Amino acid sequence: MSEKLFSRAKQVIPGGVNSPVRSFRSVGGTPYFVARAEGPYIWDSEGNRYIDYVMSYGPAIAGHCPPQIIDAIQQASGNGTSYGAPTLSEIEIAEEITKRVHGVDTVRLVSSGTEATMTAIRLARGATGRDKIVKFSGHYHGHADSLLAAGGSGVANQGISGSSGVPASAVADTIVTPWNTIPDLDSSVAALILEPLPANMGVVPPKENFLTELRNLCDNHGVLLVFDEVITGFRLAEGGASQWYGVTPDLWCFGKVIGGGLPMGAYGGSSDVMSNVAPLGDVYQAGTLSGNPIATAAGLTQLRLLDASAYERLEIGAKSLAEGLCAAFNSAGIDAVVPQVGPILSIFFTSQIPTNFDEAQEAAKNGKYAEFFHAMLSRGVALAPGPYEALFPSLAHTEKIISETIEIAHEAALEIAQ
């Protein structure tokens, strides 16, 4: 069935997929087509059930199809799907975000993480009157032209460092520097953008005090520090990575979790910086579906499910999974590390946790991830089909589910060891 669907899809969709990593290009084989999902599980078109750790690459933090979110979606959709006018739910989710994240006074809703990062860069340039931006290699900030250089995630999974169709002029003011190395900044730089916890080249944590040093460096040069929290926002903690690491940026970018499984993103910051956004200021950004009433209803409901006890459960589950995977690899005699920060983890088939993109790429070259991916998939566990992606255990991944996953990982590790 999957082969037939994939063949059919390739007739009408480039490569048969609507996001490149889904094509299984970096792991080989034919992608499964999902028919439905519930809790920690997905079922494919052939009726096979998998324990899912893709979880839509992060949004499904409460699990698939949680009844509270489905009820919110049904109620909101009964009133209409889009108005092109303000709604109460826009205010409520903006209030929820500003309440949770210290330093975010106002927030503008958009329809994706890419829109959020793209506009945050425009805003930084408009607020500072400068053109250059600095980013770190291996950090993925969406598919806007100026941010694709040396990106992680889907870009890295496809074995490319940027994209055809992006003119040199679009990246002429983008400076790429190695992660965990202090960059050179000066008065020509508008913004330093980064994932405070990179999770698009696998999980590669910042060195101790690195984010604090970046904050001080930006202050010294009048550069706006931009945290791309599309993945870490409301996953690491109630206030995201800025709360987790105790470092406050000038601008935040959000996505994934705040949409409750529906397309939504946001960017925010202090009232002073955000006052540059139209209609208050001269930095223009707009969107017909921005603040969509169904997406805001889903996102608000999900955020309200994420209290302190929820984050404690998420971290305990992720730690248990990471330790269990390490034990599985060790018992099979396989060199592998499983970096875990709070509820986020990833797998590298190497002896040491990478500290930058070059080391992450080197770890991905041996092909062991693809072998492990298929060994797990054949036993009913779905990981992301690429070595640069994270695992996203959710509130639906109970202790029993994680224990089952670890048992399967022991079998899979022994298979690839042989």
Image: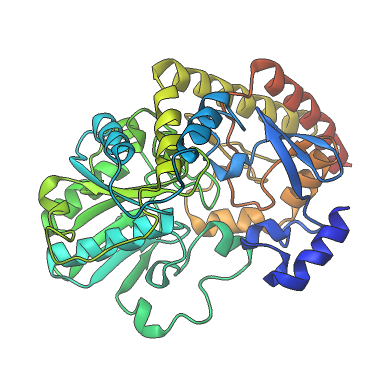
131 or 82: which is nearer to us? Answer: 82
Q: Residue at x 20, y 67 (%)?
A: 125
Most extreme residue toward the front, as rendered?
79
358 or 187: which is nearer to us? Answer: 187
Residue 85 percent location from the top left of the image? 30, 51
272 or 279: which is nearer to us? Answer: 279
334 or 300: which is nearer to us? Answer: 300
Q: Residue at x 25, y 71 (%)?
A: 132
In the image: residue 218, left or right of residue 252: left
Q: Quadrant of the C terminus?
A: top right
Whether residue 48 is visible here, answered yes or no, is yes
Q: How many marks?
A: 0
Residue 46 percent location from the top left of the image? 87, 44
In the image: residue 247, left or right of residue 356: left
Q: Residue at x 52, y 59 (%)?
A: 152
Q: Residue at x 12, y 46 (%)?
A: 271
Considering only vertical position in the picture, is 298 above or below 288?
above
Residue 119 percent location from the top left of the image? 30, 61
What's the colour scheme?
rainbow
In the image: residue 400, left or right of residue 179: right
Considering only vertical position in the picture, is 25 above or below 108?
below
Residue 15 percent location from the top left of the image? 71, 69
Whether residue 185 is visible here, answered yes or no, is no
Considering only vertical position in the picture, is 217 above or below 171?
above
In the image: residue 70, left or right of residue 147: right
